[in-house]
Image (cartoon, grey):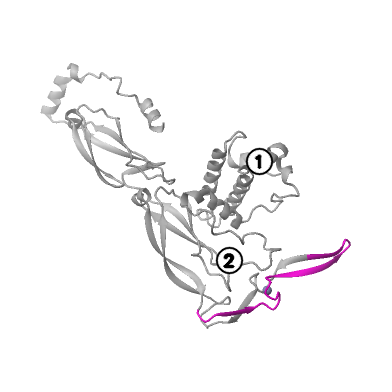
Amino acid sequence: MKEDYYEVLGISKSASAAEIKKAYRKKALEHHPDKNPGDTKAEELFKKSAEAYEVLSNPDKKARYDQFGHGAFDGSGGFGGGGMNMDDIFSQFGDIFGSAFGGGGGGFGGFGGGGFGGGQRRVKGSNLRIRVKLTLEEVANGVEKKIKVKRKIQASGVTYKTCGTCGGAGQVTKITNTILGRMQTAATCSTCGGSGQILDKKPSDADAQGLKVSEETVAINIPAGVEDGMQLKVPNKGNDAPGNGVPGDLLVAIETLDHETLKREGDNLHYDLYISFSEAVLGTSKEIDAVSGKVRIKLESGIQSGKILRLRGKGISSLNGYGSGDLLVHVNVWTPKELNKEQKEFFERMQNNENFEPKPEKSDKSFFEKVKDMFS
Ligand SMILES: [Zn+2]
């Protein structure tokens, strides 16, 4: 019995398209193979959520599924028992971030399909995966990383000739006699792997496919606002394909490093500022290390502990290109724990002084109101 697609993504049947997409992205990031190397259970969940998303993100399929359940896809379309393969998912997964990374289309177009029927198909080289660690500053402002990548390229001096098995078509036709008559089926040529060409001459340093490893520096443009676990695609920077195929892609997994003093929450940043009791009473100004450099802020005399100062636009640039988040400075007044005799006497004298009596004003929002404001 197949699991309900809504349950797989952990959403209700009334979820909007945006909610479905968000839920899938979360699941995909959670079970991503780069995050769970060798974990077959995670891979299973990764595939399951992709399959659920594939159906629920398509209004047609979703409507059929809502009406007929899994039965809607028996025999036609759907995934039968086999589920989706990883390449399908990565092309799907890429779409989720596609607009964000400006890549769109490209990459997989054209040759992904089954490879049947269309004559010779272009073989694609294998993808390479790397991991890139980013500081919060790099995430906030975007960065170009120059990374050394070991990719297989066609060795110089390699020549190819037409495949004798398929005659260069890339596929072979098989005729079988069945009780229904003669059946003709086409299959990818196993000699050339579908490229229609096989290796002719190769230098001694090349492998069986005529490829050799070369170290190359690839410039990777990382847009501002990326998140931990995201994957970027650099088209054609994976391994070369043998023959006249196209190179695979370089898949870049993003890993973000924690910042010492700034905490990220979406595009906003939070900073805990500690000031002394006398600074709170008399007012002061403080310098804060923000992601785009130092920022000086003024604290009015009489500032209350727990106040949140919002520095607009000093957060993280939005991944979709619209504006930036804010830097929220949380003011904490440090109450002295030790006092000398003179200080102690001073505060004892002030104990019943009316200036020291708490008189919260309407503008001094309660903790709950502040939390509400922060998320609105
Ligand atoms: Zn062949």
Q: Considering the image in quadrants, where does the C terminus appear?
A: top left
Q: Nearer the viewer, residue 350 or 309?
A: 309
Residue 85 position, x and y percent, is 63, 56
Residue 331 position, x and y percent, is 28, 33
Question: Please, which residue is most extreme toward the left here?
Answer: 342
Q: Is residue 159 magenta?
A: yes
Task: Answer above or below: position of 346 versus 258.
Answer: above
Q: Is residue 315 rendered to the left or right of residue 337?
A: right
Q: Which label was assigned to residue 124?
A: 2
SS class, disc 2: loop
- For residue 243, what is the image quadrant? bottom right
Residue 133 position, x and y percent, is 40, 55
Q: CA distance from mark 2 to mark 1?
A: 32 Å
Can residue 235 be seen here? The reply is: yes
Where are the magenta residues, as a range? 156-184
Can residue 4 be seen here? The reply is: no
Q: Which label was assigned to residue 354?
A: none
SS class, disc 1: helix
Where ligand 1 lies, by quadrant? Answer: bottom right
Q: Is residue 33 rendered to the left or right of residue 3?
A: left
Q: Nearer the viewer, residue 370 or 221?
A: 221
Q: Is residue 270 rendered to the left or right of residue 239?
A: left
Residue depicted at 48% across the width and 73% down the height: 213
Task: Answer above or below: position of 342 versus 104.
Answer: above
Which amino acid type corresponds to the residue marked 2 in the rendered image? Lys
Which badge, 2 or 1, comes first in the chain's sequence?
1
Residue 371 position, x and y percent, is 38, 30
Residue depicted at 56% across the width and 44% down the height: 24
Residue position for label 1: 62
